[in-house]
Image (cartoon, rainbow, N blue to C red):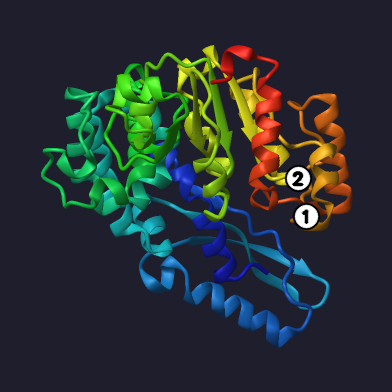
């Protein structure tokens, strides 16, 4: 026989449907709860089941479910009155029984606030009842933030600078729900490809810094008063306008041991170098000017190094790899160490030669770290490689 605990569980499971019916103005009561479970085969247990279901019913408690009985001839206990239907007759009985009176009252108030402020969110409200409830105590402030962005869809301010009367961390702490709301409220003013909240909604933020080394002194003198080693914000990097033909990207995944490889790169005409950040190469993808130059990538010879190369080439198909070949592996075979295992079996954006090296280092789980390659070897390799492009040599 169904128990009060099971009735409550089934009633709670109907709560999302109740909210949906409320928002659509549809009838929901009486709500019928299936009660077709067989009673216990032991008589005393059967009596306890009957007693329990009666004691938790509206008849005894003044609210909750009503029971419809039917006289049934049972094999074991003769004629007995058994519950054939459990039902909630109205909203009050239902909400009080499942303990949702206060929650639903707040929900109705918040729905009214949301739709009074943003009637265009009617479809969103119907789809996001759980979000409305989850953020029950925040809607006054959420509405303030959304109203500001509707009036100022491109603030170009830091979050803490926004002139909105909410506590200083409110926007930062509620980005998930704000993103969902703003995506629906200002769809024509968002950067849809961006996942970072600030970039998506035209805000300033603590941007990654990109370190560049000017390898052509004439460019350093013309553009940066002779300064050749610079740290610049990502957004400023994206707007660079330098007369360069070549960019060398050196990998830096977790440490700065290879900074000397970066700092000691040879002078090359119309060339700059970037001190990369491993899988953070995505920070470069929006620099459209990089599509017009030849890019050389020098990373660790390991599975992850080739994954980064493949990712970089997905942004810039013209990327060429430096010192990520069997020749370099052979020259420094005594410097190889155990690599980090990867479950990646295939990389779309490698050349046939690079695929062979990738499969070799993955199969043998080896890593030749960039900093293990000697300065003299690197300098000679780069000069030899660049000799193919005489205009690069100083």
User: Image height check: is 124 above or below 369?
Assistant: above
Left or right side of 234 for 370: right
* Labels 1 and 2: the sequence-earlier one: 2
- Residue 307 position, x and y percent, is 70, 38
| Numbered label attached to residue 341 | 1
Q: Nearer the viewer, residue 111 or 327?
A: 327
Name the image quarter holding residue 375.
Answer: top right
Q: Give the number of marks.
A: 2
Quadrant assignment for the N terminus: bottom right
Q: Which mark is residue 374?
A: none
- Front-most of residues 390 and 361: 390
Q: Which residue is mark 2?
A: 303
Q: Is residue 174 left or right of residue 146?
A: right
Q: Dot 1: within a 10 Å radius of its alpha carbon, few (fewer than 14), some, or many (20 or more) residues?
A: some
Residue at image point 60% right, 76% down: 50
Place of residue 190 in the rendered image (x, y in percent of width and height, measured from the top left): 35, 23
Task: Determine crowd level at label 2: few under 14, some 14-19, many 20+ residues with C-alpha closer than 10 A.
Answer: many
Instruction: Give the residue drawn at x 35%, y 28%.
Output: 235
Identify the residue at horizontal 77%, vertical 56% (top origin).
335
Report the front residue among 53 and 180: 180
Q: Which of 22 and 42 lies nearest the eye of the viewer?
A: 22
Q: Percent x, y for residue 386?
A: 65, 22
Element under disc 2: helix
Classify 193 as above or below 128.
above
Q: For this view, does 361 lie left or right of residue 242? A: right
Residue 239 in view: yes
Can residue 116 be seen here? no
Relative side of 305 to 175, left or right: right
User: Where does the image place residue 392, in percent across and percent down from the top left?
Assistant: 57, 17
Q: Are marks 1 and 2 in contact (CB under 8 Å)?
A: yes
């Amino acid at each position: 026989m169904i128990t009060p605990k099971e009735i409550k569980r089934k009633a709670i499971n109907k709560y999302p449907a109740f909210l949906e019916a409320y928002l659509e103005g549809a009838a929901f009561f009486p709500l019928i709860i299936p009660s077709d479970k067989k009673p216990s085969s032991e008589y005393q247990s059967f009596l306890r089941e009957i007693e329990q279901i009666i004691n938790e019913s509206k008849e005894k408690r003044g609210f909750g479910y009503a029971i419809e009985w039917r006289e049934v001839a049972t094999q074991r206990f003769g004629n007995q009155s058994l519950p054939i239907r459990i039902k909630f007759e109205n909203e009050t009985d239902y909400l009080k029984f499942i303990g949702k009176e206060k929650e639903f009252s707040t929900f109705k108030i918040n729905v009214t606030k949301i739709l009074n402020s943003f009637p265009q969110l009617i479809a969103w409200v119907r789809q996001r009842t759980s979000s409305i409830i989850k953020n029950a105590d925040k809607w006054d402030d959420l509405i303030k933030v959304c109203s500001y962005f509707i009036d100022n869809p491109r603030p170009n301010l830091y979050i803490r600078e926004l002139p909105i009367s909410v506590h200083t961390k409110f926007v930062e702490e509620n980005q998930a729900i704000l993103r969902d709301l703003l995506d629906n409220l200002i769809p024509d003013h968002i950067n849809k490809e961006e996942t970072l909240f600030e970039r998506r909604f035209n805000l300033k933020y603590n941007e990654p810094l990109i370190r560049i080394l000017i390898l052509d002194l004439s460019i350093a003198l013309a553009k940066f008063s002779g300064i050749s080693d610079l740290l610049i914000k990502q957004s400023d990097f994206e707007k660079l306008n330098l007369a360069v033909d070549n960019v060398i990207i050196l990998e830096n995944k977790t440490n700065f041991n290879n900074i000397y490889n970066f700092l000691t790169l040879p002078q090359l005409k119309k060339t700059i170098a970037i001190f990369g950040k491993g899988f953070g190469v995505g920070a470069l993808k929006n620099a459209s000017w990089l599509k017009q130059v030849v890019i050389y990538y020098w990373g660790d010879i390991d599975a992850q190094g080739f994954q980064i190369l493949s990712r970089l080439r997905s942004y810039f198909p013209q990327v060429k790899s430096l010192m990520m070949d069997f020749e370099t592996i052979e020259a420094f075979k005594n410097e190889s160490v155990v690599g980090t295992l990867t479950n990646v079996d295939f990389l779309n954006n490698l050349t046939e030669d690079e695929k062979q090296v990738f499969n070799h280092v993955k199969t043998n789980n080896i890593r030749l770290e960039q900093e293990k390659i000697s300065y003299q070897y690197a300098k000679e390799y780069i000069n030899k490689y660049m000799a193919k492009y005489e205009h690069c040599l100083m």
